[in-house]
Image (cartoon, rainbow, N blue to C red):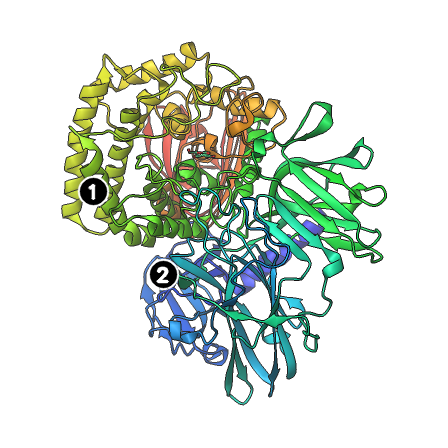
Amino acid sequence: MTKAAIGLFIILTLTLTAKGQVQLSFPRCEMRENPMGIDVLQPALSWRIESNSRSTVQTDYQILVASSQEKLAVNKGDLWDSGKIRSPESANVVYQGLALKSRTKCYWKVKVWTNKGSSEWTAPAFWSMGLLNGADWKGRWIGMDHAAKGDSETQFSRLSARYFRKEFKAAKQVKSATAYIIGLGLYELYINGKKMGDQVLAPGPTDYNQTVKYNTFDVTNYLKQGNNAIGTVLGNGRFYTMRQAYKPYKIKTFGYPKMLLNLDIEYSDGTKEVVGTDDSWKMTAEGPIRSNNEYDGEEYDATREMPGWADAGYNTQSWQKAQFVQEAIGMPVAQMNENMKVMETIKPVSLTLLKPGVYIMDMGQNMAGWIRMSVTGKRGQTVKLRFGETLQGGGELFVRNLRDAKSTDSYTVKGAVRESWEPSFVYHGFRYVEISGYPGKPLLKDFEGRVVYDDMQSSGQFLSSSATLNSIYKNAYRGIRSNYKGMPVDCPQRNERQPWLGDRTTGAYGESFLFDNGRLYTKWLDDIQQSQKQDGSIPDVAPAFWRYYSDNVTWPATYFTIAAMIWQQYGDLRPIVKHYPSMKKWMNYMEGKYMTDYLLTRDKYGDWCVPPESKEMIFSRDPLRKTDGVLLATATYYKLLTLMKEFALLQKLDGDAAAFDNLAEKIKNAFNQKFLHEGQYSNNSVTANLLPLSFRMVPDKDRAEVFKNLTNKVEIGNQSHISTGVIGTQWLMRGLSSNGRPDLAYRLATNRTYPSWGYMVENGATTIWELWNGNTADPGMNSQNHVMLLGDLLIWYYENLAGIKAAAPGFRELIMKPDFVQDLSHVDAGYQSVYGTVKSKWTKSEGHFEWNITLPANTSAKIYIPVKNISRLRESGSELKDADGVRLIRMEGQQALIEIGSGEYKFVLN
Ligand code: BGC
């Protein structure tokens, strides 16, 4: 420790002791910090407990919710005083106070009692309610319901951004002001010239015929007594979608950009005023953003900038009156998931001259977002930025895998001393940028990469002694964040970018170890529910911006697995309860329509993207590589029945549970009868054997044989390489590990030859490819930035290598049983659970084993340590029996099963 670190350590310890043993941190409402404008009527509150003694558990809590800071300060919970509640719950405690009305401000704090003492009250936290009733909106929908000059409504549509403004007078001193806005497809909001919030590409995309999301801002500090101005800019997003007048049967579009806004003002004298959108607003389509199209890029003409347009006193002579338009069809609801934000700014690594006037810039990594550029030039000069993921021979940008997405931004210089620009309403998936038309010689320092994704915390870190595992992890991290765009999309670059369900069936769970994705996926479940047809059918893409209702089983399965993931990883049961009826409806629909003799007969994608027989192919035609669609559909449907049974039991719906169980049993028998012959399933593909093994469909007497066939196929048939596609890979790593072959799982994870994740690394990938042969396959469907082939790899990293696995919802209890694989000498991982940080760090070498574990307060774990002679095991220097918070449960063969409470532990074996 450095001197400074020691000093800090002493100060921290002193404050802890001074303040007491137990402190609270991370007060969260709906897992967000002080959220504004929510519409959950009984929000869930959570906190974390910090304690300097081991095995701290909460025994009681008290929550106060007050309608003012003053009341809260004197401990008056006029909205809710829970009283002292005997309960260990510290996550997702549901508000039980007075009914909350629109605009209510809720100030809250919590105090806990534990077995190691009590805490002080937390510092006041906050949430506010949004506009819960239609009548709360004084504003009316405004827009411009036609194309403007320079717009084009052809397939490659161009629509200029629409600018709106309103000037108004605040007659008195403003006490507080809140803006509620629905800006479709995308908006920027300005008050007196200042942009509100740091979100980009807001609001989150939805099926706008179902719901439209509003965002809420506290704008108190931006208003002044006297004249004020509100300005908004509307972009297209998915509302006026990227391809117009083209395949309308498939591609959904919703109309011209429009908006609804309420600015609620409360004056110091207690009077109130609402400034809403109406036809006293002014609008123009003649501003600098000439075109914005998520696939094709943004055109910005700085010579058309309108200095001061969002300030009071601007001359609007050339502007028109805003047009009243039809209200959006979807219901306004508060956006509960995070908006996107510029989450990181990176520097390019090289800039090379390709030919006169044309440069290629390398960002050093594949990313999604855009470029911020500085330029000095003559008024009217236009710089073009064209984006691509790879280069082709001669160092040129390779764009064939973008299909018809033009992915080009352009900026026309206004002629100022130095201009800086970044787009507002588009993003690109790219590593390389072709720069042309740049006045003078572009330098690296003139450009920055803006990495854009949903504003969520990173939740984990993972390092090991294997460089390959570490590189794959980084690629996964970059890939996942690239594809969070208010919904999980398949890819960020080509003319697709769709929220395909099947890409995330297991992926969402693995991703949760890297990103705090609970709200995003909770929102996505709503998107999926809203896309369900009357008859029960669930599409393959939701929101169904592309209409694909193919009625396969494997893609819609995501609806169920993600609800289960949110329960397990975040301890939130509400999505299961909310979606249960729609899930049941789909189960019934599929059974009624596609089940024959207890087999589900409908499949569409097969084991999507298995490594094909030739390196140029996209899809295999080899029947031995592919897995029977009926097997995939039936096994998956069986798995969903087991999930539905669990969901039913959680809600005490015992009758439902029995019915699901009953059907599952019949399906299992029919499945085994049809596909299981002499210890192998169907054509003996890895996926064919793996699914029934993972879903526990295999009769006990056949399990060993089936697994043997599976490993033979991997080791001998495929020379210890991957042969699975999107479906099989979801179960592969855990399947090998949990059935006793972690060594083989490890070999697959660290291969660097084709096909493998390491092969991607070996070939320069900085993200995960769509295809195992992504460097050689046809560009027709070959994204360099998909995440679906990750399968269960990340789950395996955390649960099987680091041993960080939830044994009770939200990691309240853990089961820590790492596979200490021979070739791995070191793993160091951490995960931010809702209770706090879990850490697991182990090292082993000849004659030495050390495992450091940290568990947050209010949690416990059962851990497994391989040890022949238990008396040799030490915890922080003590024998086990003397170690605080440690209890040996029993020896299980050569493993000690030990229970530990919260705190930091160091187990050593010499
Ligand atoms: C997408 C995949 C998707 C698949 C299903 C592809 O075009 O990129 O991610 O799951 O289609 O057909």
Q: Which residue is mark 2?
A: 93
Query: The residue tagged with tag 1: helix, strand or loop?
Result: helix
* Quadrant in the picture for residue 167: bottom right
Which sits earlier in the primary sequence, circle 2 or circle 1?
2
Residue, x 74% and y 48% (percent of image)? 373
Instruction: Give the x, y percent position of residue 698.
Output: 24, 23
Residue situated in front as seen by the camera: 537 or 249? 249
Q: Hey, what amino acid is under mark 2? A: Val
Q: Which residue is mark 1?
A: 588
Q: Looking at the image, can residue 859 be seen?
A: no
Q: Hey, what amino acid is under mark 1? A: Asn
Q: CA distance from mark 2 to mark 1?
A: 33 Å
Residue situated in front as seen by the camera: 160 or 577? 160
Total numbered badges shown on the rendered structure? 2
- In the image, is 573 to the left or to the right of 234? left
Residue, x 62% and y 67% (percent of image)? 190
Residue situated in front as seen by the camera: 39 or 299? 299
The image quadrant where one finds ligand 1 is: top left
Q: Are marks 2 and 1 in contact (CB under 8 Å)?
A: no
Instruction: Give the x, y percent position of residue 193.
Output: 67, 69
Residue 629, compared with residue 213, is above or below; it is: above
